[in-house]
Amino acid sequence: MNNLSIMIQDILQKANLPNWLVGVIVPVLNILGAVLILIIGYWIAGKLARSVKKACDKTDRIDDTLTPLIVQVVRYGVIIVTIITVLQIFGIATTSIIAVLGSFGLAFGLALQGAMTNIASGIMIITLRPFSVGDTVEVGGTTGNVEQIGLFYTRMSTLDGVNVVMPNSNIWGSEIKNFSKNEVRRMNLTFGIGYEGDINKAYEVINRIYKDEPRILDEPAPTVAVTELADSSVNMIAYAWTKREDWWDTQLELVKTVKEAFDKEGLSIPFPQMDVHIMKE
């Protein structure tokens, strides 16, 4: 019997109540007290978790990746303290229970080594932060925007709107490409002209278009060079740097603009062709 039950029993006995009635009232009060503590504990856990989330969202010192983990730790920490308090009301020795739970947790962990690997990988991802929530990444051949990073899995939304749930162990063991990490990115566009075309004119057209495009950065300067004498065309690669957010749209616009300029200047973009020679005997 815990100290609170002893105190209640002493009060009831001093009120000259029969022992049988005291024996009924004390357990009922313990049950009511336990239920009340559980209700208050769960309310405090939810309230405190929401307050912690708001505080994390308002500050720039805590990354969005860590916010869900911090909120879960606070919530379940309060719930565990509440349950231990309720057990103490009924006089249950919590020390032995904690020891049993520890042994059970060890056995459970050995049985679920795969899940524990995911947890370890999740901790590494959250700690070292190769990417954060909102970043666009490529992992294991899947490209998408990171929606949530948990202890067991990471949820992404692909560029075509498919929801992907990937175990953290698969992510940590793979190459990770983060397209949102650097402020600037380079475009590598390839253009081809026919062998009868003027290479210098093609250089001039591409350089003029790149110079007139405001989204292309002056430094590093754009570069145009011949890279291949292919079967049907002379291929040129055009390097240029843009801000991260302009990278995709600028590429699409440049391909259209260069094609129109080549047509205007009489520079043909050949399609694959083959010359067939027939030998007569």
Image (cartoon, helix red, strand yellow):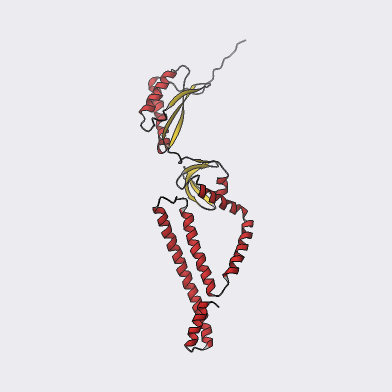
Where is residue 229 shown, x and y percent of the image? 52, 20
Observer-nearest of 277 and 136: 136
The quadrant of the picture occupied by the N terminus is: bottom right
- Please state the horizontal and vertical placement of residue 182, each as a whole percent of the image: 45, 39
Q: Quadrant of residue 141?
A: top right
Lateral position of residue 2 relative to residue 257, left or right:
right
Q: Residue 50, percent across and down?
A: 42, 59
Regarding residue 21, the answer to whether it shows in the image is: yes
Total of numbered circles in the picture? Answer: 0
- For the C terminus, the image quarter is top right
Q: Which residue is at a point 52% across and 74% down the rendered structure image?
A: 89
Q: Is residue 194 above or below residue 22?
A: above
At 39% from the left and 23% from the top, the residue drawn is 205
Q: Is residue 25 something that shows in the picture?
A: no
Q: Is residue 177 above or below residue 271?
A: below
Which residue sits at x=40%, y=24%? 207
Locate residue 261, reporting x and y percent: 38, 24
Name which quarter of the figure residue 253 lies in. Answer: top left
Residue reaching furthest top? 281
Name above or below for residue 43 compared with residue 184. Answer: below
Instruction: Give whichever of 128, 243 is nearer the camera.
Output: 128
